[in-house]
Amino acid sequence: MKIDILNEDNGITRVVLAGRMDIEGATATDMQFSIIAGSKKKVIVDLTSVDFMASLGMRTLIVSAKSIASKGGKMVLLGPQPGVEKVLKSSGVDTVIPIAADLATAAGLVG
Amino acid sequence: MTAGSSWRRAFVGSIDEAVATARWIDRIASEQGLSAETLFAVQVCAEELLTNIVRHGGNPGPRIEVTLSVSADGIELMVEDDGKPFDVATTPPRRIDQPLDEIQPGGLGIQLIHSFADRLSYQRAGLGNRVLAAFDRPDAAPVALEPS
């Protein structure tokens, strides 16, 4: 699992993930997500290059989104592939962390 | 299920072995000409079943046996373990239905198994827990009809 942190305009942080958000990917990214969630308020998680998502990957996202929301911030998920989107929607994650199809929409949602 | 091929792997449960076995299943399943959707479903269920056993099956890690059977009309993933009895097929799946600040993270794996397997069954057999997850092959060639 690869993770890149990009600083976008308007104080938005884009977390670009690539690879599998399975038990291994979640473990590998937990620490960086924890740091981001503790210091950023507008976070877009770019899932465009994530080809697999399991429950522990969703756990990482939910823990971070809760932490960001507790500070008045917001997390938005960007561009999941069809299988990953089905995982997120069948679990109801999309009801608490919005999913956007493109960066402009994600930026609008994150505020 | 019609005649096909089977692959079996036995190991003692640990996170590293679960990851290695999930990769092993991925590799075999990806060589069977499945649709992307069916392959993804097999991968999700394999990951969740194995993760669940090594995280909650007890300490020391349970013995686990995985059998992947592939035929022209479907895929079957059988996972046995000698850990704590746990009926994944009748455990109510949990779906997020509360606000973000009230969510207790975790527990979404059962829901994924129920959502992605076409059929799911559990019995006390083999090593102890025996779960069978079956997947249809909507991309399978239709059975040829006898000429009239």
Image (cartoon, rainbow, N blue to C red):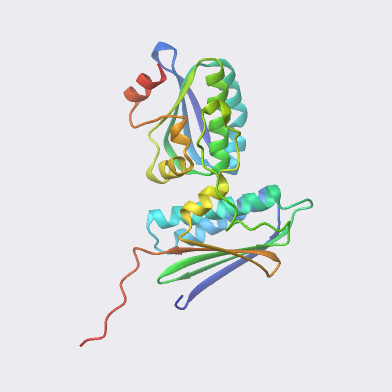
Q: How many marks?
A: 0
Residue projecting furthest to the top: A10
Does residue B87 appear left or right of residue A19 in this picture?
A: right
B35 is higher (above) or lower (below) than A32: below
Quadrant holding the C terminus of chain B: bottom left
Residue A89 location in percent, x, y?
Answer: 43, 41
Does residue B85 appear left or right of residue A2 in this picture?
A: right
Residue projecting furthest to the left: B148
Residue B67 location in percent, x, y?
Answer: 58, 67
Residue A72 location in percent, x, y?
Answer: 51, 15
Q: Residue at x 63, y 58 (%)?
A: B87
A12 is higher (above) or lower (below) than A65: above
Residue projecting furthest to the right: B60
Q: Front-most of B70 and A108?
A: A108
Q: Residue at x 51, y 66 (%)?
A: B76
Residue B132 location in percent, x, y?
Answer: 56, 64
Q: Residue at x 26, y 85 (%)?
A: B146
Residue B108: which quarter of the image?
top right
B134 is higher (above) or lower (below) than B54: below
Does residue B26 appear left or right of residue A99 in this picture?
A: right
